[in-house]
Amino acid sequence: MLRRIGLSRIIQRQFTATASPAADYSHAVVGGGAVGLAIASELTKVEGNRVLLIEKNSDIGMETSSRNSEVIHAGLYYPIDSLKTKLCIEGNRIIYNELNPRKTGVDWSKCGKWIVAQTDADDAYLENLFLKAKYDLDLPVEMIPSHKTQWIEPAVRVERSALSSPTTGIIDSHSLMTYLTTILEENNGDLAVGTQVIGMEYVPKIGYKLMCQETVNDSDEKVEISVDNVINAAGLYADKIANMLLPPERHVKQYYGKGNYFKLKSSSFPPVRRLIYPVPPRNGKSLGTHLTIDLNNQIRFGPDMEYVESPTDYTVNCANIKPAYEAISRYYPHIQPDDLEPSYSGIRPKLAAPGDKCFKDFYIKEEEGFPGFVNLLGIESPGLTSCIAIGRYVRDLYHG
């Protein structure tokens, strides 16, 4: 069964100079969001592994994993040979093929998505995206002309065309993380919540020492944990964890991309049955402020995108309501600015600095010179969709 353990219950085994030291765990996963949970649960499926998941917050999934659009992405947008495309498509199929809601408790809906074109330039973008998705990625997409869209989604304005992605959907991220926690429990993994890694050291030919401290109850208690392998899935703080080990000339930096979400003040607006996305802005910073629905068919809008200095700056920026309205009203023309109100915000770990328009792929690799240390950086969207595929990818780095 899953042991939710505090530092006082972790067995302390100091490293010794013996030829075969006994580590407390074979693998320590740092970060208890959806990706960390998926990695830990996959590692526990391998016979002989002893896995510890370390989460600094008082519970799992309290940051990026619970502050997002909860979209099951299809994998349309990213370069064909990227990890984002590979793992998103695999993760999408895992959700629909393996996570039966009645058997797993994971709530999802394959509601589909439209990307809508309002100009000739938008239309040309969608045509290229359609050809890539259908012929390069073998995804089930369809182009729908504007005169047909009004009969399918009468509340949505489409001036030129819509690219329909039927394998896009929505998922309850909390039910997904509960399911992953159950897998961890069934395979005798350990979960240490309220525990922060404050130091890390690699001892060649022996393994890793993790210095951990409690983050709850105003405790100063610290403990050293010995592990054979470390997986850094710390999300917004992954660069801080990585830099505990990497030499200064290899230090890494993530940036904080904040997305604000807005909701309608009343429920009297025309319903929409699928997700509606604009053509992505040319600045490449995001996929645009889109319309999503939750599992109760309630409409919400977002995210927009702005860089912030703090990974805890969750205050919704109300100054963004006007530009959000301007973007939304192009495809959902039933609202006025006063109809929108702040809902919530989320922050993503980004490898692209402000002003950097270059595509940044997921960074998932074993670091040279640190055997068994796997670093995950820039795990933003489509990280939720991809999480189980990422878990299997990391597992295969050790056991493939």
Image (cartoon, rainbow, N blue to C red):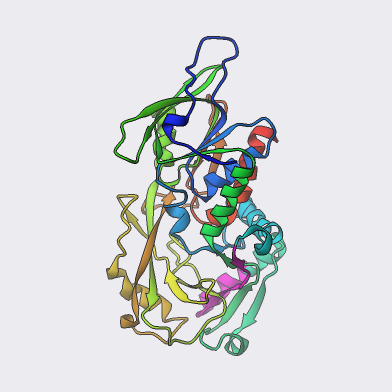
x and y percent of residue 211 in the render?
A: 41, 27
The residue lying toward the viewer, choosing from 197 and 281, is 197
The residue lying toward the viewer, choosing from 60 and 127, is 60
Q: Is 213 positioned to the left or the right of 39 in the image?
A: left
x and y percent of residue 200 in the render?
A: 43, 27
Q: Which residues are magenta?
A: 107-129
Indicate whether 192 appears above or below 209. below
Q: Is 273 positioned to the left or the right of 201 in the image?
A: right
Asked if the magenta segment contains residue 118, the reply would be yes
**Which residue is at 37% across, 51% downward?**
256
**Which residue is at 53% across, 24% downward?**
369
x and y percent of residue 303 in the render?
A: 42, 65
Indicate whether 236 appears above or below 297. above
Indicate whether 351 appears above or below 381. above
Q: Tell me if residue 250 can be seen.
A: no
The residue lying toward the viewer, choosing from 285 and 57, is 57
The residue lying toward the viewer, choosing from 349 and 252, is 349
Asked if the magenta segment contains residue 252, the reply would be no
Q: Tell me if residue 58 can be seen.
A: yes
Question: Would you identify the image quadrant in which residue 163 lies?
Answer: bottom right
**Which residue is at 44% across, 81% downward?**
330
Name the outermost residue toward the top.
18
Looking at the rendered image, the quarter that the C terminus falls into is top right
x and y percent of residue 162 in the render?
A: 58, 78
Task: Please state the total of marks drawn on the protein image.
Answer: 0
Looking at the rendered image, the quarter that the N terminus falls into is top right
**Which residue is at 37% across, 62% downward?**
345
Name the outermost residue toward the left.
319
